[in-house]
Amino acid sequence: MRGLTTSRTIQEKISPVSLTLMPPAFTRLEPQSVSGDPAPGLEARVHDPLWMLARQWQFGEFHGEDSGTPIAVHVTTESSGLQFWQPGDSTAAIPLPARPLPDDAFLDALVEREPGLEDGPGLRLRAECGAQLLDDLGDASVTGVRDALLAAFPLAPPTPADPFDAQAPRLAGLLTGMLPDAEAIARDLEVAGPTPAWIAGASDSATASKVAAAWLTWYRGVSPKPDPNTNSWIDDRLEYRFSVRLDRADQAALRAPSFEGGRVDWYCFDLDAHPIAPIAGPRNADPVRRNFDLVATPLRFAGMSADRYWQFEDGSVNLGMMASQPHDLARLCLVEFAMVYGTSARAAAGRGSLSARRRRRDVLGGRAAGSGSKRRSQKPR
């Protein structure tokens, strides 16, 4: 049968092409019975009950005492503030430099802040922020500076032009002579200081300087300067990485290896084997010790979270289905307490600190010492 088949070399210009017939979709999992009898699925059999018993033993659920129930607990905690923070991966070949963490700063905002653009903000942001400065001066009853701002810092289309913003030239033509360029004003204030040339004709120079300084602080929060050393974003992982160092003698550091954004809390961190290098002015303050008297009697209500590891909650109350609006703070606080803090005692801790339980004593004479549970919080507890 020779001659019925032939072989040819495929041209190098031809490259493999993958064809997607339909977009990705989610498949809904439903309890379908193969035998027609739904009883095995409803039984929810456990194939490894010894593993469950081992986990209960690890959590101390088999530990019991023949004693009464305490009505009060005395707790002593120690809290240490955060001194420095380091954007990016601390284990990188060339890690980013660490920087002091201000006491009034929110760590999540610093981590998720995008670095400023090299060419500065876009036309719309420059116009809006320039209008904000004029409004702030007007609210402070400062006159005689509008014409000076428009003449010294005219609004113009960004250079080079944005190819994806075809309306920028038309918008610039509309706003020219009406609003000043906010980025040019900010750079002038940073160079000239609190008394730039355009304030000379103000009706109240002192008030105009205060308004301009407050506006500059606000503007740099909206449009920061380009600084690649503050970028915590990891492109290949689509997540953030950063580290913090505690303000105490051992200079312990905590690392967030895979922060996805949102609220920064204790569960985002691991103990960092590569501590942050010290920079100028380490404070090494002593931990703040606090004593609390807590009511130990548990609160019971329908639908509360179970305090046992393998205990199922009451299905007649579903707090997760409670409808609420973002402004309904009372209902949101009630649901959060019921679903998260229903079976635990809470002790207050300072914002931006790591707290450890050092001693616990109840009214029955029971004592417990040690580090206890550590918590790092951005909000007061």
Image: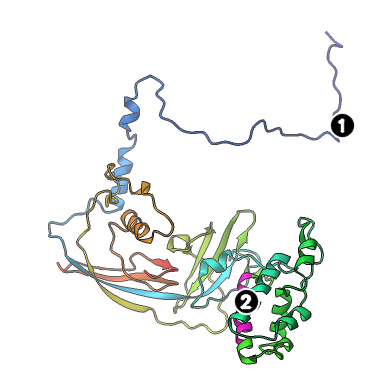
Residue type indicated by callout 2: Asp
Residue holding disc 1: 11
Residue type indicated by callout 1: Gln
The quarter of the image holding the N terminus is top right
* Residue 30 position within the rendered picture, expressed as x and y whole percent measured from the top left: 43, 30
What stretch of residues is rendered in magenta? 210-222
The quarter of the image holding the C terminus is bottom left
> Residue 195 colored magenta?
no
**Magenta stretch secondary structure, dominant:** helix
| Image disc number at residue 135 | 2
Residue drawn at 62 percent across, 91 percent down: 206
Q: Nearer the viewer, residue 284 or 227?
A: 227
Residue drawn at 75 percent across, 34 percent down: 17
Residue drawn at 73 percent across, 73 percent down: 178
Left of 117 or right of it: where is 7? Answer: right
> Residue 215 colored magenta?
yes
